Image: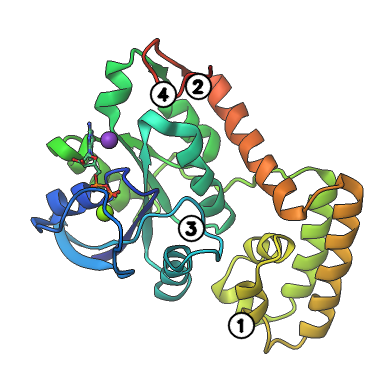
Amino acid sequence: GRTINVALVGNPNCGKTSLFNLASGSHERVGNYSGVTVEAKEATAHRGGYTLRLADLPGTYSITEYTPEELYVRRHILEQMPDVVVNVVDASNLERNLFLTTQLIDMNLKVVIALNMYDELTASGAKFDYEALGRMIGIPIVPTVASKGEGIDGLFDRVIAVFEDNEPTVRHIHINYGEDIERSISTLQNLIWQDCDIVAHYSSRYLAIKLLEGDRDTLRLLEGTANFGKIEETVAHETARLEKFYNDRAETVIANARYGFIAGALSETFTPGTADKNRKA
Ligand code: GDP
Ligand code: K
Ligand code: MG
């Protein structure tokens, strides 16, 4: 059979390790504790003739560069290039968890969402048309209860389908950051595209967005490229233009656009229950 490299990515405490242990028969420690070493645990699982090599990555709210965990997850994705990313999402805290999803969308990866803690969502009385959300964002969404092993086989079937380019839900979407930011993204993409080696490995749109967010790790990544001087100059120019226009940091404007996208998508697909943390006060 074939081997599929799968990275488990998600917020802290969303059930990644529970899923990892159940799927692979490992016994890594489950629970929220501090002082975790930043490293990926690896184990294998088998499904339908495939070997899934799972990496349980540190929990992160974002893929910026502000914590060792965030950098670790980002580098794992960009350097190890997993075949499929399983984005584990805590169903009882959708808005916050989907923020990370918007960044995975920018990276143009093969993603399947494990809608974990689905038992908590059901118990809260919420109604969530997750299939509709999945079609909207072009990512298959599979409910799971990792602590009880529910939904894991179905999740792996979708991972295999996505890996084999055989999953009808998959469609690459762009999050629209608004006319002005989109203009800056295109300007930078045009410069990045001129380096064939870089665009063979990374989504130029992702790199452009990261540059506008002021991400130094991404700037360093582009350092050797032929256009680097021009890129650096354009980042400074476009960032200044945006900050003047919005009277706010470009990074904040982009983050707000991500939250706006999530709020819009959830308003069409999600109705909170009465005992739901997702419910707005
Ligand atoms: P991680 O930080 O993402 O690795 O999350 P863990 O696997 O350590 O899980 C955090 C906590 O949530 C643990 O107490 C788990 O037993 C619990 N948990 C994991 N999955 C589920 C689930 O689907 N439903 C419920 N109710 N609890 C879960
Ligand atoms: K919990
Ligand atoms: Mg864990």
Q: CA distance from mark 1 to mark 4?
A: 45 Å
Name the quadrant of the N terminus. Answer: bottom left
Give the number of the mark in front: 2 or 1.
2
Residue where numbered disc 1 is placed: 197
The Cα–Cα distance between marks 2 and 1, rounded to whole angstroms, is 40 Å
**Pointer 3 residue Cβ closer than 8 Å to ligand 1:** no
Report the image quarter containing ligand 2: top left
Task: Quickly name the residue at label 4.
Answer: 277
Query: Of callouts 3 and 2, which one flags the residue occurring earlier in the amino acid sequence?
Result: 3
Q: How many angstroms separate mark 1 from mark 3 (CA)?
A: 18 Å
Q: Which residue is mark 3?
A: 109
On the rendered structure, is 228 left or right of 51? right
Residue marked by disc 2: 269
Circle nearer the viewer, 1 or 4: 4
For marks 3 and 2, give the CA distance: 23 Å
- Tell me which amino acid carries mark 4: Lys
Instruction: Choose the circle earlier in sequence order: 4 or 3.
Output: 3
Say which element carries label 1.
helix
Helix, strand, or loop for circle 3? loop
> Tell me, what colour scheme is on the image?
rainbow
Q: CA distance from mark 2 to mark 4?
A: 16 Å
In the rendered structure, which disc, 2 or 4, sits on the residue that comes first in sequence? 2
- Packing grade of label 4 (10 A; few <14, some 14-19, many >=20) is some
